[in-house]
Amino acid sequence: MNEVRIGVIGTGVMGTDHARKLAGGIPGARLTAVQDFAADRASALAQELGVLAIAEADALIADAEVDAVLVCSPDGTHAALGLKAIAAGKPVLIEKPVAAERGEVEALMRAEMAAGRKLVQVGYMRRFDPGYAEMRRVVASAEVGSPLFMHCQHRNESSPSYLTSELIIANSAGHEFDAARFVLGEEIVAATVISPPEPRHAPGRQPQFIVLQSASGTVVDIEVYTDARYGYDVQAELVCEEGTVRLRPGPPTSLRHAARDGLVVPPDWRARFADAYRLQFESWVRSIVTGQSNEGSTAWDGYMTLLVTEACLKAWSTGNRIAVEQPERPAFYQG
Ligand SMILES: NC(=O)c1ccc[n+]([C@@H]2O[C@H](COP(=O)([O-])OP(=O)(O)OC[C@H]3O[C@@H](n4cnc5c(N)ncnc54)[C@H](O)[C@@H]3O)[C@@H](O)[C@H]2O)c1
């Protein structure tokens, strides 16, 4: 196969952005179809991009013009759609989180192992952000010694009303859980959560401060504040024995205007991680064409991130430090 024809399920915020990227020239990829529960949304996007709108997700997965599937529907639908793609023998990139429940990921992994080849990638795109990739390289090379701390900050301008304190842990913080595992190259073994008061302009939603510890002892702290008002601002700094590595996000220029001098902060993740999403698709398509695995998050990575999430939710509700379960990694997911 030297061209991968892709169908997108779910054409909301992420699905629309991803479909436009795929239609706009990812080497080796061709967007052929889109589908959404809301048929008019899918039809409008299909018309804009000159592709097919398909009424049902099952029909999109089965379509002869679709070689690989991108799942961008809500979290609770991910695993079932992933299972259908595996049953059809088609590679599937599932937006994060891989599933809402651990049993669903276990079923997904069983199906993938039975299929005998890796078909699932999870959309933790920060793995393709050059900054996180460099942090991982620095840790692996040990050029500034072993990591001691990883400080992470995840701020959004504002959030939808359905986002609860719990969902900040269960959905928003997942990117940091996966990034910490990726950068440190080892599992997270324990979690603690402390919550400050709700901000007055976002009642019912506490920001979260999460402290994780990795298998060799590195301490990872994560601030998640989804109502920061000024923009989308993700930062990370790794402190090693003999030096530090800090992400340098932001635009290549600074703006002077109206008595201010500074950097423009992007409004949301689509602008901040535009390159990472593009690189993720390029890598996913290359891995399908070549049959070689890539650095993307596997179903196993999605599973371990879900176990970190479970431990954090328990730590939050009990106020205790909670151990993260460490199931044995199947040989299929090693290497
Ligand atoms: N990787 C990232 O940076 C990132 C960022 C935001 C959201 N996400 C993830 O992407 C997914 C989608 O988020 P979003 O913000 O685009 O949500 P959204 O609500 O904007 O879009 C979801 C779309 O899926 C459709 N839909 C619902 N059930 C469906 C089904 N069974 N089959 C087909 N379509 C269905 C809805 O009609 C809607 O158009 C979520 O799982 C979310 O966690 C990832």
Image (cartoon, grey):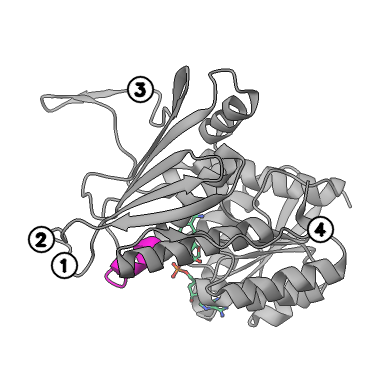
Does 294 appear above or below 140?
A: below
Mark 1 packing: few (<14 Cα in 10 Å), some, or many (20+)?
A: few
Indicate the amino acid at tag 4.
Phe
Mark toward the start of the polypeptide (1 vs 3): 1
**Residue at image x 56%, y 55%?**
18
Where is mark 3, residue-wise?
A: 253
Mark toward the start of the polypeptide (3 vs 2): 2
Residue 92 lies, in percent from the top left, at 71, 63
Magenta residue check for 166: yes
Q: CA distance from mark 1 to mark 4?
A: 45 Å
Mark 4 packing: few (<14 Cα in 10 Å), some, or many (20+)?
A: few
* Total numbered circles: 4
Mark number displayed over residue 278: none
* Helix, strand or loop for disc 3: loop
242 sits left or right of 202 in the view = right
Mark toward the start of the polypeptide (4 vs 2): 2
Q: CA distance from mark 1 to mark 3?
A: 36 Å
Residue 95 lies, in percent from the top left, at 57, 61
Mark number displayed over residue 200: 2
Mark number displayed over residue 332: 4
Indicate the amino acid at tag 1.
Pro
**Residue at image x 59%, y 65%?**
98
Q: Are marks 4 and 2 in contact (CB under 8 Å)?
A: no
* Helix, strand or loop for disc 2: loop
For marks 1 and 3, give the one nearer the viewer.
Answer: 1
Mark toward the start of the polypeptide (1 vs 4): 1
